[in-house]
Image (cartoon, rainbow, N blue to C red):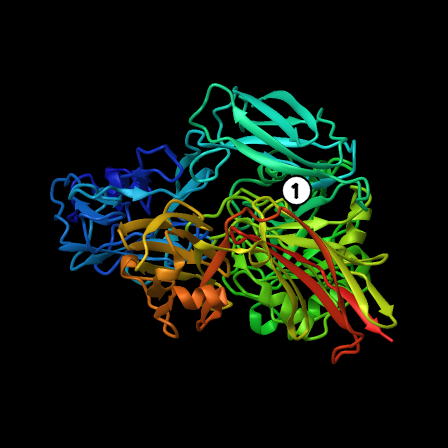
Amino acid sequence: MDRATRHRIIGPHVAPDGYYEASKRMPFLGQVACRTETVEAGSWQEIVLDYEVGASGLADGAWIKATFKFYSDWALFQTIDPTAANYISAEYQAGRLLPGQEPATVQSLSCRFDQKGHERPFQKAIIVDVIDGYLNPGDHILIRLGDRRAGGPGTRVQTFVEQDFRFRLYIDPVGTSRFSAVPGDVVMQIVPGPAERLIVTAPRLIRPNTAIRIHLRTEDAWGNTTIDGGNSVLLTAHHADTPPVVTHAVLSDDGWAIATVDSLKLDQPGEFRLDASLEGRARVLPAHAYVSVDPAARFERIFYGDLHVHSDDTVGTNDTVYNLGYGRDVAGLDVLGYTANDFQITEARWNQAVAHVNTMNQAGRFVCYPGTEWCGNSCAGGDHNVVFLHDRVPEFPFDRNGNLVRSFEWNEEMASDRIEPGAWPLEDVYATYAHDPEGHLLIPHVGGRRCNLGWHHPALERLVEVGSAWGHFPWLLQDAVARGYKIGVSANSDEHRGRCGGGAPGTAVFGTKGGLTGILADRLDRGTVGQALRARNTFATTGERSVGLAWSGAHLQGDEFTQAGELRVDYRFLGDIGFDTIEAYDHTGCIWSRDLQREAGFSQRRLRVRWGGARIRDRYRWAAWQGRITVTGATILGHTAFGFEHQEETIRRSSPVTVDFHSDTFGDRDTIELELDAIARATILVEGTIGGYVKVGDARAGSGFVHQPTFRLETDGPHLLETGTVTANLAGVDMHVSIQRLADQDMPRDVQGSFVIGPDNGPHGHRQIYLVGRQRDGSAVYTSPLIVMFT
């Protein structure tokens, strides 16, 4: 209404001059602005979010939330010390008053950070409370992320690349604790930094003259594929018995800095070392990979897959086309399983994603499957992936009879705010797909809502996921075998950060490299690969292009067969840095092992300190270790760290006799190797604290692990020389700290052998034997079990 109309209708009244017109021009919920448009992943910044109060104003007791997605590993904010890193603040600035308008009465703003302060996916929240008074339309609240005004260094941005990273503001304008989104997100591009290292990816085991594709890329300090291409790569293949083979490739300068080499023919049996260096860029670290050529190899080459890859259709980073392309062109995967959280994806986006998957699928080049993640709580069966192996239209979100097969529906676009159950509990999922087990693969896995092995469908559930970016879960396979379930292994990324195929770890809940599934199949097509997956002819790695093979005669890992008399098991493991141990397990635990360090002959000078495990089996599982190694009576000549996933996990020589360390373990193992002048004279003490997840409050203060807040292990040189290993087993899941002797020489990358077990079935009428190979750096390879019924 214009002024005349108002006066005619209302009659005489008093109001601030021009307030009516001004409020009608303003967005009712306000607007937010930010001058930052592009930031480098992992960089340190000060970022200001400028919220202008809308026509609604803000009542005394109102809230504002500046939210971002839960998968982000942006450094945790704090409000305690303005001189320290990641300090956040909120500042009030009054807008211009109109004639007759009363000034706002707000006395202060209170700022805090809550990792689960809002709804998924925008769960992480900087919360600003309005204290003692109200705000006027046009007033401003400046939220500073990484406030530097008191001398702090700023805030560390999330470490992975993201197109259109978003801060979304929600306001509770009248103090009822009911929130509405402020229209117009703050959008910024998180881009990779400069190239720091070169990566080369190649198949680990092939027959002579097998056509292979070698993938090259450059990564920044945080493991993001860079975009500063155009450089030439020198690739040299070395073999002990033949002259080096040299080739060149140019990294693309259009998008990812990647290149492929498919002209290299490797025909000489034995091991080739592929050395790659960036010509003219000496500061970029070179890379190497190993390819073993074996005429007796049972398969022409072994395929590597990642069966658990999210996109921004649900909880992933970047769109589906980006993630599928990354898997094929950057990570060099042979097989990829697209995964959508069943409760979150809309039907329209699901149909679009399936179309993209089918377009990318190309027999002989790249096998791609659509899939969902059934997201029931652990009490109802827990997370299970459903991989659609067939070429038909998937039965999702409705089955062939029109029944809803989601666990429930909860997404940003749903019309209702009520959660209605769909396929719940897990038996409803079994009922949906049991009519066609050959066309489906269910994979119980450990992530947020870890699977519950109190449920099992033998025809549908053929693999379990023993590793992902969430951590390492060997206990899951052992639990399944102990229950008598005939189930094989997979490891995948469960990728939320746009870096599938063994991508680099981050600094929050996704703290390890994503895993890989090794697939033993004759051909690369949906049907053949699907049969191999359901036959359990697989192995799992913690992200490396390693190989783990186990067989008995004609029977491969995953096969089920009968045996009269004792069983000979043959094995072969191929890695990159060298294997420490090879172990065999059945339903009782470890039944056979090789200690390759001991076999090589222990050094009188070299040892390592190793720690690892997880606090719990559930979502926020990691153990935060702060420790110190003290060596007295001997001189520390040098130290080397393995398993430290990123630059915020640290090792420091703090004095002549001490080495300090900080690392997080998610079921994995971290290591510091020490060289002393003589172990015999040494006393070695390892001690420290174990913390965990900090949901709210000052993350710097930590949160002690209630069952094991401290650890301590001490030994003297003579005792270590005699025993070889001293271990303290701690509370938690495979939590331990140990001191171990090492050999002087490098460990073998190719380990072969056999052992014999007696003809004894387990309590379920059969016996399952699987093998685990662990390398010097803590990486591991798991084979699917041989499933034997002794007669």
Query: Which quadrant holds the N terminus?
Result: top left
Residue 577: horizontal and vertical position, in percent? 56, 45
Q: Which residue extends farthest bottom?
A: 763
Q: Relative to residue 139, is residue 777 drawn left or right?
A: right
Residue at the image position 79 percent from the left and 40 percent from the top: 300
In the displayed structure, 112 sits above or below 312; it is below
Residue 269: horizontal and vertical position, in percent? 76, 36
Query: Which quadrant holds the C terminus?
Result: bottom right
In the displayed structure, 349 sits above or below 273; it is below
Q: Relative to residue 667, is residue 267 drawn left or right?
A: right
Q: What element does badge 1 sit on? A: helix
Visible residue check, residue 702: yes
State which quadrant residue 468 falls in: bottom right
Q: Relative to residue 309, is residue 51 drawn left or right?
A: left
Residue 11: horizontal and vertical position, in percent? 20, 48
Q: Nearer the viewer, residue 68 or 250?
A: 250
Q: Which residue is mark 1?
A: 352
How many numbered badges does the structure rendering display?
A: 1
Amino acid type, residue under disc 1 in the picture: Gln
Q: Nearer the viewer, residue 157 or 285?
A: 285
Visible residue check, residue 548: no
Residue at the image position 25 percent from the left and 47 percent from the top: 85
Q: Nearer the viewer, residue 189 or 717?
A: 717
Residue 148: horizontal and vertical position, in percent? 20, 41
**Label 1: how many Cα within 10 Å (few below 14, some 14–19, many 20+):** few
